[in-house]
Image: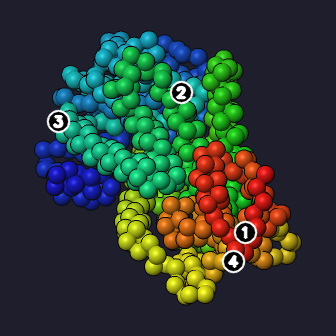
Amino acid sequence: MLQSLIWFLMAFFGPIVEDELITNQYSDPVSLIEYCRIIETPQELTPDQVYSLFSDKTTPLAPQSDTQGFSQNYFWISFNLKDYQHQESLIIELDNPHIDHVLLYQHKSKWDLVGYGGDKGRTFNNRSFLNRRYVFPISDLEAGTEFLLMVDKRNAAVSFPLKLWDKNSFEYHDTRLNVIFGVYFGMLIILTFIAFTLGIVLRQKFLWLYGLYATAMILYMFTTLGFSFQFLYPSFGSLNNYLRSSLIVIIAVFFTNFTREYLSLDLRKPKISRILKGLNTFIISLFVVGFTYYNFYSSNVTVLLNLLYFILFLIFICSILAGIVTLKTVKKNAIIYLSAFSAVFIGSGLYLMIEYGLLNEGDFFMNPIMIGSGAELLIFSGSMIFWAKDKISDKIYSKGTTQSTITEAKDDPVLELNAPQNYIQGKKSKGKNDEESGISGQKNKHFVPLKEITHIKSYGHYLLIYVDQNTKPIIERITFEEILNRLPDSFIRIHRSFIINTAFVTKYNSTNVWLNYSLELPLSRTFKAPFFKFMTSKVSSEKKVKAQ
């Protein structure tokens, strides 16, 4: 376990730690891109045709970079290994498992095919070398040996980080990297399971939404690294591209719903919530169109991917804005949200810059999204565990002190509330800034006389407590079950969303209950029988109830 932790830290802190731990028998990989010439062709050519293009001094060369952005062309990379010192048991690695078709040619007396990878007609087990990346063993080099690498990733972002390894060094590095990824994904799976479990036990929607988001993110990273093709569908390599696009949509949908729930945007910032809803609808529609009309998707994949990335950018902006504007009302949640997901936003932004050719993929020792997601999970899962601990403690306390929150004054019992004393305004008026959602941020305990509470309404994670003669409800972050334990028997549940004070009931029938003759509330089938039983046996000296 200690060794796995060391390897995990090595992946994050790069060669500074690695140089201290790797012995001299393992050399570092050589980045080949600095010694390459690159050209693009609209058609797939033979090696001789491509070599003649390289020989022609007028042929325009592509940028000497392992990241080329979006393209509809074939890429040809030429390099020579004559100056390399170790000429036995070498490995050429192309660290991008999502290229559709790769061919490597070596020139001796003629151009010979060294190996292939990514051909849509081939399975994982038919690769030249079994590895999730494209790996080509090289041996028996002659002085001045030239190579041609063909990369086909048309209609998408093209990157081809090329490295030259000593065979022993590569095997050591690959084994170590697989252990690191095993620890990484194991940690993610455990944290996701905890989120699901806490969501079910504590009945918190935002936790299982986070669990769904984390599950989709795990599958996306598993696929991005090439493990899905290796382990999940080794006979269908072409699924990689389509599965990644689908998972991006699923991640965006779960993430926006989690954001709305965790920051209570429907209640606090309904405008931002509606924008996120709209972006969700648009991105789902885009996915359905692409999935339903496959030919349309194939012929317009570049346009659709750019549109998808633009929507993701808008979601990032709205999410950051949501975290900032809710700092005044849900400060703790907003700080945790911004701290955790800023890492994901930064990682995703860097990855998009790689996709568009603005950054070199080879400059990163690990996928930026993986680093960001790892940081996000550590931050959020830690806060989630502490939150769950407090929540469970509160539940135990409330069960043991059911009546302690009702101050027993003989004439006027009151309900003690621990949440901020917030109000919702019935109608928002122009020029009143907070309170666009009508919420104020005072954090003092306050007391509400029980006889003045007319009814209580469920609103997401909150309850809206309505007081007679007051049009602004008090907001309390508590469940129905917990507040029922604090209330006397005169308060009864009539619907999954409503608790009423029976002292205010003036009329009722089989489907509705009226309070103060004017407020009509629904009476559901589930709670109708106990309500009728209570009202039948109830003797009210204050008001005469009319039953219809």
Q: Earlier in the sequence, mark 4 or mark 3?
A: 3
At label 2, which amino acid type do we have?
Answer: Tyr
Contact between marks 1 and 4 (CB within 8 A): the answer is no
Cα separation, mark 1 vs mark 4, equals 9 Å
Image coordinates of residue 485 in percent, x first then y, are: 49, 67
Residue 248 makes an appearance in the image:
yes
Cα separation, mark 2 vs mark 4, equals 59 Å
Indicate which disc residue 168 carries. 3
The structure residue drawn at horizontal position 69% and vertical position 26%, both measured from the top left corner, is 289
Please name the residue that numbered disc 4 is placed on: 452
User: In the displayed structure, would residue 188 be above or below residue 234?
Assistant: below
Number of the front mark, 1 or 4:
1
At label 4, which amino acid type do we have?
Answer: Glu
Please name the residue that numbered disc 1 is placed on: 504
Please name the residue that numbered disc 2 is placed on: 242
At label 1, which amino acid type do we have?
Answer: Phe
Q: Earlier in the sequence, mark 3 or mark 1?
A: 3
Cα separation, mark 3 vs mark 1, equals 82 Å
Q: Earlier in the sequence, mark 2 or mark 4?
A: 2
